[in-house]
Amino acid sequence: MAEMLKIDNIYKTFNRGTINEKHALNGVCLSLKEGDFVTVIGGNGAGKSTTLNAVAGVWPIDSGRIYIGGDDVSRLSEYKRARYLGRVFQDPMTGTAATMSIEENMAIAARRGESRGLSWGITKKERVSYREMLSTLDLGLEDRLSSKVGLLSGGQRQAITLLMATIMKPKLLLLDEHTAALDPKTAAKVLEISDKIIADHHLTAMMVTHNMKDAIAHGNRLIMMHEGKIILDIYGEEKKKLTVEDLLHQFEKVSGEEFASDKALLS
Amino acid sequence: MAILMALDPAALLRSMPGAFAQGLVWGIMALGVYITYRLLDFADLTVDGSIATGGAVAVMLIRLGINPWLALIFAFIAGMAAGFITGILHTALGIPGILASILTQISLYSINLNIMGRSNQAVSVDKYNLVVSLRYLSDSVSTKIQIFVTTILFCAVIIAVLYWYFGTEQGHAIRATGCNQQMARAQGINTNFHTVLALMLSNGLVGLSGALYAQYQGAADVNMGRGAIVIGLAAVIIGEVVFGKLCAGKHFAFAYTLLSVIAGAIIYYIVINIVLWLKLPSDDLKLFSAIVVAIFLSLPYLKTKYRGKEKQNG
């Protein structure tokens, strides 16, 4: 299988030379095959979201290379990398434009990576297909195409953001704690939708989560980060047998510290 | 009481056509303000300078013998250039939006003086075949009809074009940029490019409005734009407060919203004319405008605050 993502020894330091200097990424290396669905766990400040942001190009990395689908994207700006990526964020407000309607948001996503000219921003044919896509979510959104996204709940917005991230099949789907801001029931529903979309489209995906159970239950591969490095990488059969206790034990062994996130333990 | 008796209702009535025409002309500027303030979420003070630039360019070109209609197009382009400068200062050089626009506005003062060679230049309606003029309101019935047909058609065409444009892929990209930059970039939208584009379009309309207004009053003046942004904001906000509920959720809601901006400008000038009719000193007009805008700007905030309290009590 083809290599979909290759992160080659990337480093990133924030606030260099100040009292707040933070070595966020310390030589992260990762290679994902097409169809890999990797969950990313680790304590606060371990570099999980930072890794995703580095891949998305939110800011330039200090050194190292990033390849998506074989293309070197290390120097591409965020908006240019967007054509490779689908992204869902922790804050449900981030992934959608609140003052625009559901169909307008989807139409914008459907044109990701294309130049935006003077043809209609949304066509009749698109509306029909959006209605169909929304009905698969089973949230009753298919009858609210022209509603402003700002009127929807966090869970509904995350579900729409997921659709938007995958409406143009991305080479890589980045889910950055996308259920962390939702109530447990909604979070479970959004996770279920995520699983379904990833399976249906055979997507390559990275999912950052604080929840160890979710990290074990989803995907075919699990990586754990600590102090800007990947300290654990488990896949296939071995991952299926994992338990939360195993993970905690492994973490203490590799890092020499107690797992520092209450959120991960309590859930 | 004696003061009220001294007021002449007929005089107020006579001032209404002027208020209406002025509102239509300034309404075009208000549409420009709407694009930056509401769609792009950018407090663009370039307006005070670019409206005078539009007026100066049009007047100088007309004096050179260029067709007044053609002069409007050049005024539009000059306005776009002003918006481009603000956009580059903000996006390429990282200057906060409001400061970038103030820098452009200040520099335009000198540029406008250079365009005109002095602080004001007249275009006489007797010498040139102007698109609109104050004189048309008093000349004859046919010129009266002419000025209103022209200005109303002008506004209608601009609203139609804007309605179309903001329904295109590019228009969607501008709206997404104004609403949520992070989302826009994640969807592959070049937010810097679209910010500059919107500023150009906005200031183009402002320049056009300045060109029409210079023809209307028969002169361009380097100070004609002072406080223009306040009038533009007033029009946008009065339009929203008065017509907001009527526009929401309708088919063509966006077109109605644009229409309400023009209506807001007309209401503003009617109110100003009433104030003048009440014989309030015209020196205080800008103070009065600022107070009106402050009241309308604070209304939505106070409303939610008041409603919040009500809920808590209930």
Image (tube, grey):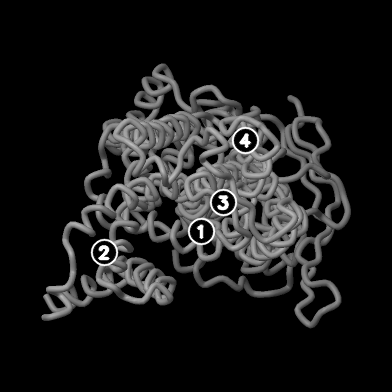
Spatial CA distance of label 2 from label 4 is 33 Å
Rounded to the nearest angstrom, the CA distance separating label 4 from label 3 is 14 Å
Disc number placed over residue B71 in the picture, else none = 4
Q: The residue under label 1 is which amino acid type?
A: Asn
Label 2 element class = helix
Identity of the residue drawn at 86% across and 57% down:
A62
Same subunit: marks 2 and 3: yes
Q: In which quarter of the image is residue A232?
A: bottom right
In the picture, measured across the screen, residue A265 lies left or right of residue B190, that is left
* Real-space CA distance between mark 2 and mark 1, rounded to the nearest whole angstrom: 65 Å
Q: Which of marks 2 and 3 is in front?
A: 3
Residue A88 visible in the shown view? no
**Residue A117's mark?**
none
Using the numbered discs, state the Cα–Cα distance from disc 2 to disc 3 in whole angstroms.
25 Å
**Type of amino acid under label 2:** Ile
- Give the crowd class for mark 1: few <14, some 14-19, many >=20 residues within 10 Å: many
Chain name for mark 2? B
Would you name the residue on which mark 3 appears?
B219
Residue B174, image x and y in percent? 55, 42
Q: Contact, CB < 8 Å: mark 4 with mark 3?
A: no
**In the image, A79: left or right of A150?**
right
* Residue B118 showing in the rendered view: yes
- Residue at the image point whose x is 54% and y is 30% from the top: B169
Element at badge 3? strand
Residue position marked by numbered label 2 in the rendering? B274
